[in-house]
Image (cartoon, coloured by chain):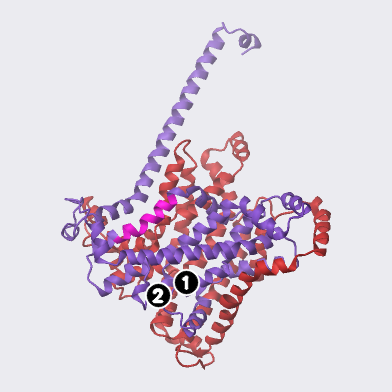
């Protein structure tokens, strides 16, 4: 191991080194390859576990009642007709339209009413800002059950039960969670941009509408998406406010309440469940990036 | 309560550098001169009105109603502490629901955290294709709760469901009856919860990816193997995120409703094995129209939630590690 050996590549010693190095590299590569195989096998197995219920739901939804109750593994024959019949067996389209109506209005209401508070809480300095923000965070932690009963009483006094109003109107009074999420994003926009615009004579309104909102598109779409999905998946609100009128039922209520009243084959309810999930999963595929960024933004990040 | 709030604000308040103090001071002074109060008032008005109508007034009202007998038709009648006395001494279902809720949170919260940690950690491993796996792990979290629960009661149905058929085929003689068996129904709900672990997993994944690479390199130079690296580098840096999800998990578990309601509606849960605290509030309020009693239950829920949060904040000093010391003082 002298310097001479290192300089002179012809020597035996350095040949041995090179051989060792090659072997080590080979070992390392093989180890890495084995690790990759192990990782991917675990991941594939877990993906299979996560996907299995969805797969089973689709499989069962394609069986007829006889097949399902015989515990068939595979639909034979495939009853594609289920997906048409479900619209006749239950008022599925009607429920879907109801759900869509509530979800879209909730989404609009939440976005429109949450952006301005988030803006003034993050982009302007004013007395009481911190206090307001603390109160907003506190309401976020407040269990809904504490306010649920008096709110129900108010809505019943003004004869809004059963109707869509109790589900939609509160959305237009901003949601603490959306304000929080938007504020987190707004604070990351550099102040210099606002200052420059102010010097150019931009009013606060213009600043919000023309500069901050366009820059915050990812956060705003995340908030809109969460509001939409939250409303689409909501069960408790419709359970309180819509159950009494069948014409107003949303998908969630419809699926759980319909069986009690009418006789529907259980596997037909699986078809309906599959159709209930489908739009959400499609939306997720198109908005994955927005969605995951949004979830991350709500996590613990200073 | 104030402590918890302080902790959370310190969490979200943008950190300032020491040198910037004088600067921001000037800034606020200058702005104070032209604080656009009208604009601020207009912008805050939806939230202020919403807060008054849907939070402040209802809180006061439900606190008052918790001391009354109130059936929605007749005006509330004052009964003093009667509702609370009834809850603690005369209401068996109250204790059943408390027991069930504690049981499921004690098992499902740690289990969820471990499972989410594992799924997120394994997602950081592969060089390629991790986004495909991430998508597949996340999709179940998107499935509407009602649809997921209804499907699970079917899939786990001992008579027609494929799960027990599979268990029998691999040689398990008497597979559990899951939702139909009071001893197994909570486990079925826990499995349903673990299936939708996606959103917690995404937060953990972001936490894992935030760990500075330099720390791993330093650990590697010190000769730490990968388990030691996970144990002494990754895990300590993840404790704030884990802490956060533990707190929200505990708060959430006392509001656990939809899954239990849908599942017990599907299988007719006579033994109350899936009867949780939120189900009790719902039943008292909207099945029995005992609005006053339900309000008292809700206030007990609030106190329990605050106590749990307080205890968690107290214990965190022992195990939560904040790298820059500025989060959660």
Residue drawn at x 32%, y 60% is A273
Q: Is residue A282 magenta?
A: yes
- Residue B36 drawn above or below residue A26: below
Taking the image as shown, residue A60 lies to the left or right of residue A27, namely left
Picture residue at 40% right of the left edge, 73% below the top: A239
Q: Out of A46 and B64, give the one closest to the viewer.
A: B64
Which chain has been coloured red in this picture? B
Q: Which residue is mark 1?
A: A167
Residue closer to the observer: A289 or B141: A289
Q: Which mark identifies residue A263?
A: none
In the figure, the purple chain has which letter?
A: A
Name which of mark 1 and mark 2 comes first in the sequence: 1
Q: State the mark number for residue A242.
A: 2
Q: In the visual, does A5 lie left or right of A67? A: right
Count residues near mark 1 (Cα–Cα under 10 Å), then give few for <14, some for 14-19, many for 20+. Answer: some
Q: Position of residue A231 (x, y in %)?
A: 46, 64
The reply to whether the magenta stretch includes residue B154 is no
Check the picture and name the quadrant holding the N terminus of chain B.
bottom right
Horizontal and vertical percent position of residue B285: 43, 82
Q: CA distance from mark 1 to mark 2?
A: 9 Å
User: Which of the 4 image quadrants contains residue B312?
Assistant: bottom right
Dot 1 falls on a residue whose secondary structure is: helix
The answer to which of A220 and B320 lies nearer the viewer is A220
- As drawn, the residue found furthest toward the top would be A10
* Circles 1, 2 touching at the beta carbon (< 8 Å): yes
Q: Chain of mark 1?
A: A
Q: In what element is the residue under mark 2?
A: loop
Task: Judge left or right: residue A230 versus residue A114.
Answer: left
Residue A2 visible (yes or no) = yes
User: Which residues are drawn in magenta?
Assistant: A272-284
């Amino acid at each position: 191991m002298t310097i001479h050996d290192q300089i002179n590549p012809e020597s035996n010693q350095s040949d041995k080194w090179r051989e060792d190095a090659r072997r080590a590299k080979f070992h390392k590569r093989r180890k890495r390859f084995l690790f990759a195989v192990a990782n991917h096998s675990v991941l594939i197995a877990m993906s299979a576990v996560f996907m299995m219920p969805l797969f089973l739901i689709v499989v069962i939804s394609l069986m007829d009642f006889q097949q399902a109750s015989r515990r068939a593994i595979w639909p034979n024959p495939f009853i594609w007709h289920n997906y048409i019949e479900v619209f006749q067996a239950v008022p599925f389209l009607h429920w879907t339209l109801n759900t869509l109506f509530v979800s879209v209005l909730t989404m609009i209401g939440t976005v429109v009413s949450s952006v301005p508070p988030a803006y003034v809480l993050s982009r302007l300095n004013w007395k009481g800002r911190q206090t307001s923000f603390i109160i907003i965070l506190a309401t976020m932690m407040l269990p809904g059950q504490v306010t649920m009963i008096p709110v129900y009483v108010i809505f019943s006094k003004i004869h809004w039960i059963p109707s869509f109003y109790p589900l939609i109107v509160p959305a237009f009074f901003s949601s603490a969670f959306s304000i929080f999420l938007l504020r987190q994003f707004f604070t990351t926009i550099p102040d210099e941009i606002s200052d420059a615009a102010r010097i150019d004579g931009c009013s606060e309104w213009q600043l919000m509408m023309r500069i901050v909102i366009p820059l915050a598109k990812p956060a705003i779409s995340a908030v809109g998406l969460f509001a939409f999905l939250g409303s689409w998946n909501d069960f408790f609100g419709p359970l309180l406010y819509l159950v009494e009128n069948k014409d107003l039922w949303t998908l969630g209520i419809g699926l759980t309440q319909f069986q009690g009243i009418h006789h529907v084959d259980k596997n037909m309810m699986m078809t309906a469940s599959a159709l209930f999930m489908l739009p959400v999963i499609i939306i997720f595929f198109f908005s994955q990036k927005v969605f995951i960024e949004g979830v991350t933004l709500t996590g613990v990040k200073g | 309560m104030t402590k918890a709030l302080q902790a959370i604000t310190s969490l979200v308040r943008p950190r300032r550098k020491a040198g910037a103090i004088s600067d921001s001071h000037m800034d606020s002074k200058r702005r104070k001169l032209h604080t656009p109060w009208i604009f601020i008032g207009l912008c805050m008005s939806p939230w202020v009105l919403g807060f008054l109508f849907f939070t402040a007034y209802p809180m006061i009202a439900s606190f008052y109603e918790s001391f009354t007998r109130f059936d929605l038709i007749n005006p509330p009648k004052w009964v003093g502490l009667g509702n609370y006395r009834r809850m603690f001494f005369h209401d068996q279902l109250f204790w059943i629901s408390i027991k069930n809720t504690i049981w499921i949170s004690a098992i499902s919260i740690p289990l969820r955290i471990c499972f989410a940690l594992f799924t997120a950690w394994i997602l950081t491993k592969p060089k390629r294709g991790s986004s495909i796996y991430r998508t597949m792990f996340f999709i179940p979290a998107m499935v509407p709760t009602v649809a997921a629960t209804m499907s699970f009661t079917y899939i786990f149905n001992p008579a027609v469901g494929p799960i027990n058929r599979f268990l029998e085929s691999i040689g398990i003689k008497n597979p559990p009856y899951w939702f139909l068996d009071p001893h197994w129904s909570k486990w079925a709900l826990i499995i349903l919860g673990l299936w939708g672990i996606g959103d917690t997993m995404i937060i953990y994944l972001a936490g894992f990816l935030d760990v500075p690479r330099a720390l791993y390199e330093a650990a590697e130079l010190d000769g730490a193997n990968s388990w030691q690296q996970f144990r002494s580098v990754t895990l300590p840096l993840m404790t704030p995120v884990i802490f956060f999800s533990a707190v929200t998990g505990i708060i959430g578990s006392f509001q656990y409703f939809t899954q239990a309601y849908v599942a017990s509606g599907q299988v007719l849960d006579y033994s109350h094995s899936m009867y949780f605290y939120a189900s009790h509030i719902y039943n008292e309020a909207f099945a029995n129209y005992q609005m006053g009693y339900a309000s008292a239950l809700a206030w007990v829920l609030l106190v329990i939630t605050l106590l749990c949060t307080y205890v968690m904040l107290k214990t965190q000093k022992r195990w939560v590690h904040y790298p820059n010391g500025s989060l959660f003082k």
